[in-house]
Amino acid sequence: MLLARNGKLVVEAYFPGEDSNGRQRQFNSESLQEQHSVSKSVTGILVGIAIDQRLIAGPGARLATFFPDMRSLTGDAIKSAITLRDCLTMTAGLDWDEWRLPYTDRRNVLVAMNHSADPVRYVLDRPAIAKPGAEFAYNGGLSLVLSEVVRRVSGMHADEFAERYLFAPLGITVWSWERLNGGTLNAGSGLQLRPRDMAKMGQLVLDGGRWHGTQIVSSDWIRESTEPRVRNLPSPFNWLMRPGLWIARNAGWIVQNPDGYGYQWWHRTLHARGRRFSAYSAEGRGGQLVIVVPDLRLVAVFTGWNDTLRSSPIRIFEQRILPAVGSG
């Protein structure tokens, strides 16, 4: 757990625990931590940098223009209308449900993508079941598509692009990012960072894309990324559609569902001492979290591997930490 207030690290604590493979480890400040879906938020920043560099016209660009070789995309009247914005907000309209089966099941659509010969083509070959931009469906494959767009416009794999234009300017020198078959970057979940470097990501976003006086990504992109562009999030965020989660919520195990999604960033409204705080967050399975509370100039980082409802770091943050910070 790390807390940074007004750009200064004020709390830093490490504890022994398990990684996602069940191995017991003693973690410290130099330990690379699995980011899981926090990776998506970093990928969203890379898209913004590519737009700043005018390698991409903007989030309204049609996805098909970057994939003229993907006939299943360019030849489909509905899918050819998908934009980068639809991918960033997970409203591409493709047939995708990665929560129907557990991630340990090879039939899970995300797991099948990870083991496919061409993961990006696997995603883009999925049939359209909704008009682009109309419906939210959590889709880790779209982050891989975004990273492939970055590769195609920059001539660099997205992790190499990140190293040059994001990690190096932030002073991030130790990191790892998994590649899948064909060299495809696992942009949705494969990143590993040290906790202090996770905090740098949060501080970068809090400061409107600036780091030590250098504009790394435009403030416009940060604002667009963290706005709640998609609301009324469906299952499993809609508690009434998942009775088990509804019961868990009302038992006090976890806090309310997110109230919106931006460009690969979640938006939340948190409560403490009778006050409401807008926050945006990068969230990864198992307890990975970078959460930013602008009104308090606060960045919080959690890592770990507790893949259960009772372990939600957001619950800990809202019920234990936020009241203390908010009163100070």
Image (tube, grey):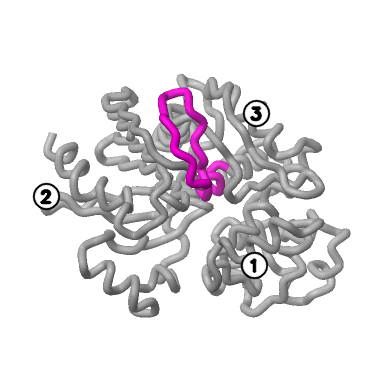
Q: Residue at point 65% right, 79% down?
A: 129
Residue for badge 1: 109
Q: Residue at point 84% right, 72% down?
A: 75
Q: Residue at point 72% right, 60% down?
A: 62
Q: CA distance from mark 3 to mark 1?
A: 29 Å
* Span shown in magenta: 21-42
Q: Secondary structure at mark 2?
A: loop
Question: Nearer the N terminus, badge 1 or badge 2?
Answer: 1
Foreground residue among 305 and 212 = 305
State which quadrant residue 93 falls in. Answer: bottom right
Q: CA distance from mark 1 to mark 2?
A: 42 Å
Residue for badge 3: 163
Q: Residue at point 45% right, 59% down?
A: 261
Taking the magenta stretch, the answer to whether it contains residue 70 is no
- Left-right relation of 58 to 239: right
Q: Is residue 240 above or below residue 137?
A: below
The spot of residue 65 in percent (x, y) is 79, 57
- Left-right relation of 147 to 258: right
Foreground residue among 15 and 143 = 15
The spot of residue 186 in percent (x, y) is 66, 47
- Left-right relation of 323 to 58: left
State which quadrant residue 46 falls in. Answer: top right
Q: CA distance from mark 2 to mark 3?
A: 41 Å
Q: Secondary structure at mark 1?
A: helix
Asked whether disc 3 touches disc 1, contact meaning CB atoms under 8 Å apart, the reply is: no
Taking the magenta stretch, the answer to whether it contains residue 26 is yes
Asked whether disc 1 touches disc 2, contact meaning CB atoms under 8 Å apart, the reply is: no
